Amino acid sequence: MSAIKHRMLSQFARFTIGARALVNLVMMFAALGMVMLSLNAEALPSFARQTGQNCVACHAGGQFPMLTPYGRKFKLTGYTIGSRTWFPVALMMQAGATRVANATNGSSSDPNGSGGNGGSASDNFPKNGLPYVGSVSAFVGGKITDNIGLFAQWTYANYDHQGDDGRWHSHSSTDQFDLRYADRFTGDNRDLIIGASLNNNVGTTDVWNTFNSPFQIVPTPIALSSALQPNVTYGPINKPLISSGLVAAGTGAYMFWDNFIYLELSGYRSANGVFSFMSQGIANDATTKLRGTNPYLRMALNHEWGAHSAMIGLHGLNAAVYSDPTDLSSPLIKSRDIGIDGQYQYILDPHTVSAQFSYTHENKKFNDALWNTNNPSYLGAAANSSASLNYIKLNGTYIYRATYGTSLSFVSVSGSADNLLYPTQAFGYANNTPNTRVWIPEVFWTPIQHLRLGAQYYHYTQYNGGRANYDGTSSRAAKDNDTLFVYAWVAY
Amino acid sequence: MNWSWKLAAMGLMLTGTACSNLERSRDLNDPQVSAETTAQQVCSICHGPGGNSISPNFPRLAAQQKEYFVAQLKGYRSHGRSDPAGYEYMWGLSRNLRDEQVEQLATYYFAQKASPNAPGDAVLSAEGAEIYKNGVPDKKVPACSACHGTDGQGAGAFPRLAGQHADYVKKQITIFQRTDQRPGGAVMKVIVHDLSARDVEAVAAYVQGLK
């Protein structure tokens, strides 16, 4: 144990962010803090303005995205509690820096690529350790009628892509969208919430944040580093479809009976045609194209006692995905995801404890043309007719006085070997498996509810199927992809 | 006109009609919504059905004294009561309630049947019973029962304590002792000032077990 501790400490010690960058970062955080502290305490993001409540009412320990029992009801009743506001807009901004452990020997997803094997750090990690404002989101959220409410997010990425001239260009696109209708039949001895949702992402509708992609470990370096730090990873590359944050159009219905049984059935289809407003700004090849309507099922048992609450649930998605999102006649990948998940919470001021787990098994079956060399239309996308993935997520969080917090997460992916899905060359899967394991400790501080400062450390014990020399040709090890992420997160 | 615009237009029409649903509304700025509806649709989420909350984060309201209830809700609304949990949760929820709605909510909760709460720790409760019934003569702390009633049922401006969550009672006594965040309960500052932490725990455990 002490050896592991020593190794992790020495890893941390290696992250000496340049003194100048650090000063910039501290000044940026200080400036943000001054701005936020000068704001009127009653001026809260749109949902909070609607209810007039503090973030802690809906978010466990005041931290997005985990919901309290009340927050879950707020969402399930269609964001309709409170008074309608005429300007239901909120803004969120992430700024920070990422620094990868080894920026000189290859890169995580392209160990043998152009910048690999001794290539300069600036090729692979152009903003390594440098602070930047990564993304800004605008939300329109709130009560529309007594039964209808909306949660919609539009995200602006400051550094979306680099032009031919080498300059960075921004881009904005739709992010999360969830339009709900809900009704609640309740009395002294009964309680039934029923609702319907039109949304653009599997899991956006969920209130437990266990398996779903849209709301899990937040913030992540995702929006910050997708283009600026293209080779920084924040967990496994390969995830089951249900947890991958696919952009699609979902319509469905749900019920929550007596605070005990939750059932949701939705159908997801491509976000094109009439539903294209839910994928505005997202490149055609970046959306998931689905054949017909694909069922998503969610069941959960919930129990609350004293300051405790617990949930155990099942989640599943059965989807037929076009292998080429730009070609709706391309061969299909049939994906069947099923999983179990759970959550425990203890919320009693000044303590908030939260623990979550999810296990998802995915089985993918490939159309003959994708894998069978004898097929006249053979495309060579996979070596086998099917592939499986096992995805595990564990998280434990403790927050004191809704201000100081720490969490530890573990994410693991393992799957069947396939030398075309997980090729050695260029992508660096020496063992042709996606197997990846990462530990993510985090500390954060929320001096005021609009501002969160934190640091996450992604420590890989396995990456793309290997621990050391995972690509088979360079000496890059899983731990070389370890990443420190420091951030300021602001919502107003 | 393409489909997305048609859908947006339909959405706007729907919004324009703003169909209200008075019997099951969660609108806190509509004087037409009855107190019973608000209690069931909104308050019950934290304070439990009929005001018998499960989580000790939220006080039990069932059978609470009307006068006390009205004073608290109006205190939140005017920001006179400013203990952290109060302003975090209640300032906003109460800000647009009309006086009649506040009175009706008080009437509704006073009429609810209080479910027994789990009895507190036996040793602590025994100590608490002594304080509750006889006070702490050495510290000149009067008996709680003098105002809150022999069975903790309260009277008028003095709140019902029977069955109240011990954690909530403990936090309120501490607020009275250390702060001026509850000016409406200023009289309590003098009364509980000399109670020790153990005394507070004990009396809180005792009242939680009262039926």
Image (tube, helix red, strand yellow):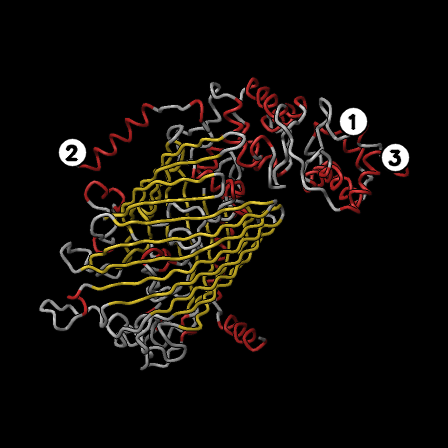
Amino acid type assigned to the residue bearing label 1 in the image = Cys
Q: Which residue is disc 1 drawn over?
A: B147
A396 shown above or below A309: below
Amino acid type assigned to the residue bearing label 2 in the image = Met
Query: Circle 3 sits in a helix, a strand or a loop, which is it?
Result: loop
- Name the chain under label 3: B
Residue furthest front in the image: A189
Front position in the image: A412 or A10: A412
Q: Position of residue A258 (x, y in %)?
A: 49, 38
- Look at the numbered discs 2 and 3 and tell me whether their residues touch, using CB distance below 8 Å: no
User: Would you identify the image quadrant in which residue B135 lies?
Assistant: top right
Mark 2 Cα-neighbour bin, 10 Å: few <14, some 14–19, many ≥20: few
- Name the chain under label 2: B
Front position in the image: A467 or A113: A467
Distance, label 2 to label 3, CA atoms, is 80 Å
Query: Circle 2 sits in a helix, a strand or a loop, which is it?
Result: loop
Q: Position of residue B189 (x, y in %)?
A: 77, 33
Sequence-wise, which precedes: disc 3 or disc 1?
Answer: 3
Do tags 2 and 3 sit on the same chain?
yes
- Name the chain under label 1: B
Distance, label 3 to label 1, CA atoms, is 16 Å
Q: Which residue is disc 3 drawn over?
A: B140
The residue that appears at 38% across and 49% down in the rendered structure is A298
Q: Position of residue A336 (x, y in %)?
A: 30, 58
Amino acid type assigned to the residue bearing label 3 in the image = Lys
User: Would you identify the image quadrant in which residue A405 lies?
Assistant: bottom right
